[in-house]
Image (tube, grey):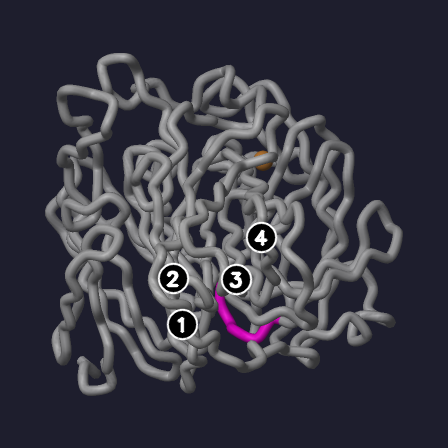
Amino acid sequence: MNTARMIIVSLILGLFGQLYAYAGQPLKLEAKEGFYQFPFFETKTPVWSYNDQIPGPLIHGKVGTTLVIDFVNGLKEPSSIHWHGLRIENAMDGVPGVTQDPVEPGENFIYRLKLEDAGTFWYHPHFNSSEQLERGLKGVFIVEEAERQPWSRDLIWLMDDWLLQKDGKIYPQFNTGRDLMHDGRWGNVPTINGQFRPEFTVKPGERIRLRLINGANARIFSPHIEGLSADVIAVDGRPVTQIFPFDGFVLSPGNRIDLDIRIPENAGGEIFAVEDRFTRKAFQLASLKVDRSEPVDSPKFSPATEENFIPAQMFEKVKVEKIWDLNAIRGGKFGIGWTMNQKLWPDADKVDVPLGVPRKIIFKNSSSRLHPMHIHGVFFRVLERNEMESIEKFTRDTVLVGPRESVTIGFVPEHPGIWLTHCHIQEHAEAGMMTTIEVKN
Ligand code: C2O
Ligand code: CU
């Protein structure tokens, strides 16, 4: 076991809680049943969590190192862990039936993750996912850059929503007809790091890296920070091609963005509300409270950008490898199935691509629902929407395909293996909306 290369593994409890550094030994993540106290109920809510924490432990690693994670399944059903967005060895990707066997109750699986890319990632199960994620199994995975930039503060917000009953319990029916006919299971309690409307205290003058991660089963967030300007510096873990103002960015399940936020020096005593504006009725997610301390010196530096990472020009002469038509049918294990080219996973219309050659794919949504399509193990660039040029200033691993919309993406397969490709609305994926891209050496 190559634990010598493991430099930083740390766990943070709570929002500003204690920091535990584990050096030279694998980090253990145990999925198990437990309880979590929401503020609205007298009794605790039964949840499933990693290491009894909601959200799961924050994992920190440094780019270029290898983390060893011992996953122990303390649930009563099989599970696995998928490292969303990380480009790692295919055998470590955590997809039962594709890259590994399901981890049975009482068993464990050692994940060895060589961290190739710095940025904001997350982890979650890939078995019975619509239920396992919803019951609380998820956490953030930060890969630190080789050289750290001098942010005043690094804030990490895992956005989620829970569907809770009046008695405080998680609504126990999963993959309902209603969820499947619509955009999956949307909750009634939005949380940031498991907290309802938390307030974060910052100082005047600070320059903050705010990382937003949408870990919900199905809810789409479009966060807005009233009164503060912010720039988007990274999307889905990768620095953007060109920094742009944060204004109405839509985060679908799976997406992450990193923001550069400057707190004005004269903002002492102010409270800035962060609200979601995706749905017609805006609601508060969190707030940033500026304390009345002396303004701190705002660090001066330019966040990194990546002009040359998967540039759009490299796809100019590339033909489309596959068009995946996204639609619903009657059938499948829940009575309503979500298909890619009329097929339901595991009977899927798959694709094979050679290593290292630029490829184009079209996701064509023939339905009137939302489909955030995610590909494991690659970053891709959006090139066209509805066959009109629409080049994004960043790359992604998850793209929202709206009703009747088609999205053309370009990518370069750089890691051999079988990579799952699916809708990140967990209920749609469980109802069949999954396939694979096999990268052959
Ligand atoms: Cu977060 Cu298969 O994905
Ligand atoms: Cu979908």
Residue 296, label in figure: 1
Q: Amino acid at mark 3?
A: Pro
Label 2 – label 4 distance at C-alpha: 34 Å
Q: Residues within 10 Å of mark 2 (few under 14, many from 20)?
A: many
Q: Residues within 10 Å of mark 1 (few under 14, many from 20)?
A: some
Report which residue position mark 4 lands on: 398
Report which residue position mark 2 lands on: 203
Q: Give whichever of discs 3 and 2 has the lower sequence position.
A: 2
Q: Amino acid at mark 2?
A: Lys
Q: Position of residue 76 (x, y in %)?
A: 16, 35
Quick check: marks 3 and 2 in contact, CB under 8 Å? no
Q: Is residue 416 magenta?
A: yes
Label 2 – label 1 distance at C-alpha: 7 Å
Report which residue position mark 3 lands on: 264
Q: Residues within 10 Å of mark 3 (few under 14, many from 20)?
A: some
Q: Give whichever of discs 4 and 3 has the lower sequence position.
A: 3
Q: Which residues are magenta?
A: 413-418
Quick check: marks 2 and 1 in contact, CB under 8 Å? yes
Q: Amino acid at mark 1?
A: Val
Residue 408, label in figure: none
Q: Amino acid at mark 4?
A: Thr
Q: Position of residue 41 (x, y in %)?
A: 20, 21
Residue shown at the point (47%, 61%) measured from the top left: 85
The quarter in which the C terminus is drawn is: bottom right
